[in-house]
Image (tube, rainbow, N blue to C red):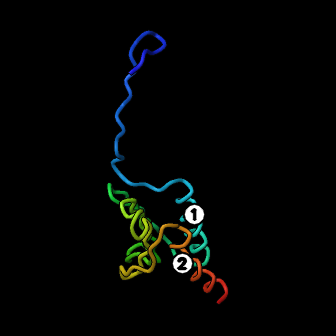
């Protein structure tokens, strides 16, 4: 505590844990850039995001009423273990885990290159 400009006392608020995990701006930019390129290639048509106290997730769909073709999750609690990023496939299988978003998205990026070339 310290004295403020008007002679009052300034009390620092205690640090709070956020109520939900979210994406940083650069993370969301990277994910949405990939999404936009997959839409342009005709692979995806819709997406959904989910935010909870444990994880943030982005899912991409070929059609709105289907299960997601891919889902990427950010779980900060796993940062020190296998990495906070996980890429899931269409049937819920783990395709890639890692500490860096770019590395986890690499399999989808490679698929995009195949779609564009083919």
Q: Secondary structure at mark 1?
A: helix
Q: From the viewer's side, name the closer residue of 31 and 66.
A: 31
Vertical side of 112 occupied by 101: above or below: above
Picture quarter with the N terminus: top left
Q: Which of the image's four quarters has the C terminus?
A: bottom right
Residue 82 location, x and y as percent? 41, 71
Instruction: State the residue lying farthest toward the bottom.
Output: 118
Q: Is residue 49 left or right of residue 112?
A: left
* 91 left or right, relative to 6: left
Q: Which mark is residue 30?
A: 1
Q: From the image, tell me which residue sits under label 2.
A: 108
Residue 85 is situated, as x and y percent measured from the top left of the image, at: 44, 67
Q: Earlier in the sequence, mark 1 or mark 2?
A: 1
**For residue 58, which quarter of the picture?**
bottom left
Q: Nearer the viewer, residue 101 or 12?
A: 12
| Location of residue 79 with respect to 70 vertically, above or below | above
Alpha-carbon distance for marks 1 and 2?
12 Å
Residue at 34% over, 41% down: 16
Residue 11 drawn at (x, y percent):
37, 23
Q: Residue at x 40, y 12 (%)?
A: 8
């Amino acid at each position: 505590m310290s004295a403020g400009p008007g002679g009052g006392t300034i009390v620092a608020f205690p640090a709070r844990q956020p109520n939900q995990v979210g994406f940083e701006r650069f993370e969301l930019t990277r994910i949405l850039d990939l999404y936009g390129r997959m839409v342009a290639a005709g692979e995806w048509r819709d997406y959904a995001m989910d935010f909870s106290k444990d994880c943030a997730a982005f899912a991409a769909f070929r059609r709105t009423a289907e299960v997601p073709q891919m889902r990427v999750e950010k779980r900060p609690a796993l940062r020190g273990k296998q990495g906070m990023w996980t890429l899931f496939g269409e049937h819920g299988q783990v395709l890639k885990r890692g500490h860096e978003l770019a590395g986890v998205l690499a399999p989808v990026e490679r698929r995009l290159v195949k779609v564009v070339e083919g």
